[in-house]
Image (tube, rainbow, N blue to C red):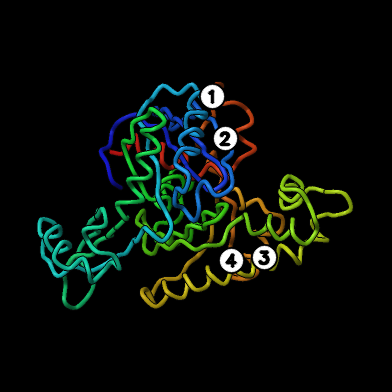
Amino acid sequence: MFGSKKKSLVGLDIGSSSVKAIELSKSKTGYEIIGFAQTSLGQDAVVDGAIADAEAVAEAIKSVFAAGNFKAKNVATGVSGNAVIVKRVVLPVDSPEEVAASIEFDADKYIPFDISEVNLDYEVIGPSDAEDGGLEVVLVAAKKEQVQNSTDVVTMAGRVPYVVDIDAFALQNTFEVNYTPAEDATVALLNIGASLTNINITKAGMPMFVRDVSVGGSQYTDILQKELQLSLEEAEDLKFGKQVGMYDAEMVAPLLDSITDMLTMEVQKTFDFFKENYPEETISSIYLAGGTARTAGLTEKIQAAFGMEVEVMNPLNTVKVGAKAGSGIHDLGPALAVAVGLAIRGFDE
């Protein structure tokens, strides 16, 4: 949310296990990927959404830009994790012009950080339904240190950090471009990355409840490695349903389910928090994104746990793939959701 708009951007998704970069073009018929590259990150370069090894991440960014032949030099990147707070709040004001002053005066009521330590942004939704009136606002706070770390690695890589967004919002951008839910539908978007899961409960184009939880794909991989004495590559293959030696997806389902149970518990907590705040709302469906969304049996387990429709998000559902992007991009599927959503920021109205 922090930054200017209307400028061609490369969406740069800096995850815990990899860096992915996407450049889009836009025409009357929609979006097209005109550049793509990705590279792996070493362990602990990014931990729970925070950059721990700036030099390693900067080198990875240089690598993807060298491989992707991108036209744009400006970058949109995202932040997530414990340093980011997103809340819908009702402010005791009568006009949008009063919102900024109200937030600055009362920020400590809404965020658990000192206001001097964060970047603040907001979007006015409209008049509140509360008896006392006021305006409902989506308030976003991100610790300056984490935003600075993200922009620093982009600069170290020789690129221009033009926009810093929130990963959960980028996820919503991708969903809205690729899907058309019913106007009154409330849906939950889950971006399951290597170490974090971004949860965005959204309705009518606006986030209603956003939360990041520390459960992700690396935990599936770790338990397979530890319990079955497998290499990282073998554990990853097994996680995604491939046969590895004597092991297949059915044999290791109990191990995978133990992590899925942790994930569903955190999602249930989020849904419970949401219900407390919005008792009249009902979540109708769940969309899974992130590389971990392809874990064997995950969709079915989440569907059984919550009793609602669960679908793996396809960021390329309506987004075309240009010849220069490479055919291998289709194999990544839901792992592209955040990068696509960040690149869309270059075309914001």
First reached walking from the N terminus: tag 4 or tag 2: 2
Secondary structure of the residue carrying tag 3 is: helix
Q: CA distance from mark 4 to mark 3?
A: 11 Å
Q: Is residue 21 above or below residue 120?
A: above
Please tell me whether mark 1 or mark 4 is closer to you in this view: 1
Q: Tell me if label 2 and label 1 are in contact, CB under 8 Å.
A: yes
First reached walking from the N terminus: tag 3 or tag 2: 2
Residue at image mark 2: 39
- Which numbered disc covers residue 67? 1
Who's the residue at 43% across and 36% down the image?
11
Nearer the observer, 214 or 179: 214
Apparent side of residue 6 relative to residue 272 in the rendered image (left or right): left
Residue at image mark 3: 301
Q: Amino acid at mark 3?
A: Lys
Residue at image mark 4: 263
Q: Amino acid at mark 2?
A: Thr
Secondary structure of the residue carrying tag 4 is: helix
Who's the residue at 49% across and 21% down the image?
69
Q: Amino acid at mark 1?
A: Ala
